[in-house]
Image: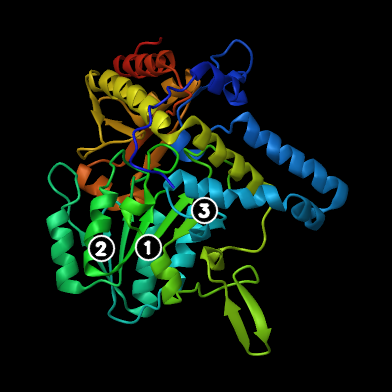
Amino acid sequence: MQTDQFIPIVPIDKRTVRADTPGLDGPSLDGPGQPTTLFMNSAGASLMPRPVVTAMQDYLHLETQVGGYETERLRADHIGQLYGEAARLINVRPPNIAFSYSTTAAYMQVLSAIPFQSGDVILTTTNDYISNQLAFLNLQQRLGIRLIRIQDLDNGDLDLMHLEQMIQQYRPVLVAITHIPTNSGLVQPAETIGAICSRYDCWYLLDAAQSVGQLSLDGERIQADFLVATGRKFLRGPRNTGFLYVSDKVLASGLTPLFIDRQGADWTGPDTFAVRTDARRFEPQEKSLSVVGLVEAVRYANLLGIEAIGQANQGLMHRLRTGLGQIDGLDLMDWGSVQSNILTFHSTRQSLATVEAALRQGGVLFTVQYKQGAIIDFTRKGIDWIIRLSPHYFNTEAEIDTVVALISHAMTGKSV
């Protein structure tokens, strides 16, 4: 467990982390003579460091020799290290951690564990992730729950006064917050929300898919009942991995996912079963080689230090936001007083096709998002697309400057 004792932040050795990242040395995707790739998509699926890849390769090789079950038995100690590493990363205890295939898989397990009844209220935001919103709407149609969204302030911040008013008025069963939206660099005040939820004793679910691995998170201070995270984004792990934090309060209450398998419970008699006492009641029994990749990804972040990662990221994002903010005709779309490693922009001067082509010709890897994935946010911003850039600590200032130059030239119709 972490303490309040001051520990100096050791800056990241960029040369070492870049040497650990094979994808940064890869050739152009378009063949010889073309620009090498500039990776700016860690909010989608980041580049895995060498220890992550090596662990999975070794696991797969062993599996080809002795089969999946025996490999899992032989690597049980390695797999079991996930709980301690993930707990260390977010300052909680290992029994409160469960493996998951993804953030969304963990999220659905959580929603299935809460015994919603007709008329129950889920309180969420206008920025919650699309898959979460779809799940809420489905619960609304099937079970008759009420979905209420908290207002935002004019600058994009969550209206915390309105949040508290809605809790007082509706007494929600669940407050569900996406810490950093996938379509915006906004950072929601997770700790303040947790304090409010604790005061009114309602379940608090935090989707930390975009924040775990890029920001320092303290589970004790956040006070979430559930926190879901993915491996593939800023943690730099493999796809189909993630983890779930479950509070002691949840475990003591007896909440159990609707669909539980042999990992989460014991079959004690023809018509009886006993649920695990720890968070792994939410965990699937079936795992693959990717779980050891997740172990090494979380360990890698812990070894670097999440505070050092956050410090390096702040410098890169300041440079990127400053550079793009000086380009005429380019609109930065990230609202809110606190912003993250996600930067989104739009332009009415140039078409999406023009800017996208310029970036791809320059070797930049990024994401385009459309209105369907964030209907409320895009409607109020009056846009139907954004380009999302999400660098990480392994990127360099020179790479940031190159991306800024590519976009600047695209806006003027010139080539770099």
Residue sitting at the far bottom: 271
The mark tally for this picture is 3
The crowding category of the residue bearing disc 1, from other C-alpha atoms within 10 Å (few below 14, some 14 to 19, many at least 20), is many
Q: Earlier in the sequence, mark 2 or mark 3?
A: 2
Nearer to the camera, 303 or 71: 303
Q: Secondary structure at mark 2?
A: helix
Give percent across and percent down for residue 177. 31, 56
Q: Earlier in the sequence, mark 1 or mark 3?
A: 1
Give percent across and percent down for residue 44. 47, 39
Nearer to the camera, 274 or 229: 274
Is 1 displayed left or right of 183 in the figure? Answer: right
Nearer to the camera, 390 or 88: 88
Q: Is residue 332 visible?
A: yes
For the point 40% across and 74% down, the residue is 114
Say what amino acid the circle numbered 2 marks. Cys
In the depicted structure, whether residue 102 falls above or below residue 41: below
Q: Which residue has dot 1 on it?
A: 225
Q: Which residue has dot 2 on it?
A: 197
Q: Is residue 240 visible?
A: no
| Chosen colour scheme | rainbow
Query: Quadrant of the rendered structure where residue 412 is?
Result: top left
The crowding category of the residue bearing disc 2, from other C-alpha atoms within 10 Å (few below 14, some 14 to 19, many at least 20), is many
Mark seen at residue 358: none
Distance in Å between CA atoms under marks 2 and 1: 10 Å
Q: Secondary structure at mark 1?
A: loop
CB contact under 8 Å: marks 2 and 1 = yes
Q: Which residue has dot 3 on it?
A: 243
